[in-house]
Structures are given as structure tokens and as C-alpha cells.
Image: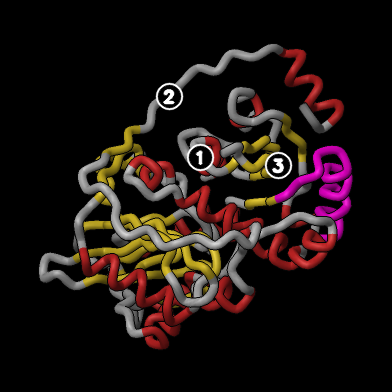
Amino acid sequence: MSKKRITIAATGLNNTDNPGPGIPFIRGVLDSDFFSAKIIGLAYENLEPGIYMHNLVKKSYHIPYPTAGSGVLIKRLEYINNIENIDVLIPNFDAELYTFMKAADKLEKMGIKTFLPTLEQYEERHKSNLPEFGKKYGVKVPESRAIFSEKDLGEVEKFIKYPFYVKGKFYEAELSYNREQAITYLRKISAKWGFPIIIQQYVSGTEVNVVALGDGKGNTIGAVPMRKLYITDKGKAWAGITLSDDNLIRMTKKLIRKTKWRGGMELEIIKTKSNEYYLVEINPRLPAWVYLSVGAGQNLPEALVKLALGIEVKPFKKYQVGKIFIRYSYDLITDIEEFEKLSLYAEL
């Protein structure tokens, strides 16, 4: 049987020490026995490595930052789509999702399919809303408060004791043991991501993560839990291993069933010594370690594309325990002409 030929556009090509999910997502799609995919890269910076990985990404285009608004984005995507005839577009960054969700109907009219969370799903799982989310869906969440200025820190200290995490609304988290550290991290993170800043109580235990995919009807298409084996100074997993943990799978399926989650997600969870599970974060897209799910027998990138195209996807029933991923650095060699062409014409 010949493979279905499709064109897929994806963001998140920054495969550096703080990697985006784009490249592992693309690898999963290219491993598909169902699709023969042409990959179009959508990049924000000239030095995103995925742009130059021509064995994976056939052509790349600059797109405007989310702060430019959905109107500017749509205009750029119309230009790209007229050339490439995109079938499916998969955004892979938290900070861009809101813009793409707002643009989803217009993309649909252009013939571009997406499979994204609803605005309600996206908003209610926000770090600043996580305590209410936990109460609503019956999961334990560490005490958290959102602050909107440095002055608010004093009020939060009455409810949350040191050590606690200072978290950006999209990315970054720093563990603070005293007020001096907290103020330093607050200024650093707010300068990059703005307010609110989330203050979250530290919970002692082992961090475990789950990558999952919901069909938007309450069904879990797949879920693979992982424990980090090596963590970088940015807190990113540089190695991890799939786990056998029925409690994590049950927790994930419960959340997807109750929220009717649509699309990819990553749950960040702390498992305490007394076997309590605290949900500390929900990332509303596939994570940068998603290729581990492919290696463990659940090709979630392929399944996500099928859902976007309206193709029936049967839930995965199992995954392989003890599969390990290990990231590595690789020197990619390219020519200055390619960099210049991208800078001049915003495409390569």
C-alpha cells in the first residue's frame, strides 16, 4: 500500500541546549508507515538548527513572533501556503499557541488543518490557574499564587514558605531558599516573560513526566511516563527512561477524560516518598522528549497528524518500559550563503 503524501508545517526548530519539540516531532512523523511527509519548517530565528537539517526539513520560512498578532501571522502563512499547499500545521511552543488557536478557523479556510486545545482548556491549565484546576478535576497541586509585581511577594510569603519555585508564565522555574534569591529570580524571569510570575510551593520527591495525546472527546490516544536520568542547568531532560507506573497512567487518563483534552500534552508531576502525586505543571503541547514515545512503541506525532486530518486513530494499548533516550550535541556544518539567503529572503 502506497503512503499518503502530505505536507506538514512545524515550529520549534531550536534543537539546542533548551530544545524545542519540533525536531523530535518531525522525526516521529517521518518514521510513519502511513504518511510520506514533506516537512516545512517555520522559524523565528536564523540560527534554529532545524532550518539547516535538510534531511528532515525540506524548506524553512521565517514567521513573525506571536507578539505581532494573528493578523500578521495569517498574512505570512497565506504567502507560505500559496507556495507549499500545507495540509497540517503543528505549533510546538507554549508562547505561540494562543495566536495559532485564534487563527485556527482562518487556517481551516486556507485548507490547513490543526489539532489544538480549546481556548478554555489552554487557559484553565495555566500555571496561575493550576490550584483551581486541581480542585476542579480532583488532583493534588502544590500551593501556588500568581503575583503581578515585586511588591506582591511579601503577601505571598504569608501563605507559601521557603523553599518555593519562582516560575515564568510560559517558561523557566528557579528554586528560591530566601527572599534575596526570590527577588533575583523574579526580576530575571519577569524581564524575559513578563508578569504574572507564579510562586509555587516546593514539594520534595521525584519528578516524573507523562507525554500524552487526547482526541478531544475524552479518550486518551496514548500516554508514556518517563523519569529524567540527566538534567541540564536549564532543568531540561538530557536523558530519561520510560516507567511502569499505573498511577501515572490513571491520573493522565482521568484528566484527559474530564477535560476532554484536545491535542498533545505533557504532565509534570512530583511523586513523594509516601507515593502521593502532585501535579506541578501542564504543558499544552508535545514535549521535546516526545521521540521517546516513538521508541517505546507509541508514535504520538503520527497520531496527532492523523487526528488533525480527521483520520480515525485507535488508542495505543501498551508501551515498552525501560526504553532510554539520551540527547547529544552534533556539529551541523552549513555555508554562509544559506544563512545570508535566509536573512535576505526569509526562506531557505
In the picture as drawn, the residue positioned furthest to the front comes out as 1
Q: Residue at x 35, y 43 (%)?
A: 237
Spatial separation of the CA atoms under disc 1 and disc 3: 15 Å
Q: Residues within 10 Å of mark 2 (few under 14, many from 20)?
A: few
Q: Is residue 85 magenta?
A: yes
Spatial separation of the CA atoms under disc 2 and disc 3: 28 Å
Is 27 above or below relative to 10?
A: above
Query: Given the image, on which type of amino acid does mark 2 rest?
Result: Ser
**Mark sitting on residue 281:** none
Asked whether the residues under the numbered discs 2 and 1 touch, taking CB atoms below 8 Å apart as contact, a structural biologist would say no
The kind of secondary structure element at disc 1 is loop
In the picture as drawn, the residue positioned furthest to the bottom comes out as 136
Query: Given the image, on which type of amino acid does mark 3 rest?
Result: Thr
Q: Which residue position is annotated with label 3? A: 7
Q: Which residue position is annotated with label 1? A: 33
Spatial separation of the CA atoms under disc 2 and disc 1: 28 Å
| Apparent side of residue 18 relative to residue 164 in the rendered image (left or right) | right
Q: Quadrant of the N terminus?
A: top right
Q: Nearer the viewer, residue 116 or 185?
A: 116
Q: Residue at x 73, y 21 (%)?
A: 339
**Residue 33 locus on image (x, y percent):** 51, 40
| Apparent side of residue 212 relative to residue 343 in the rendered image (left or right) | left
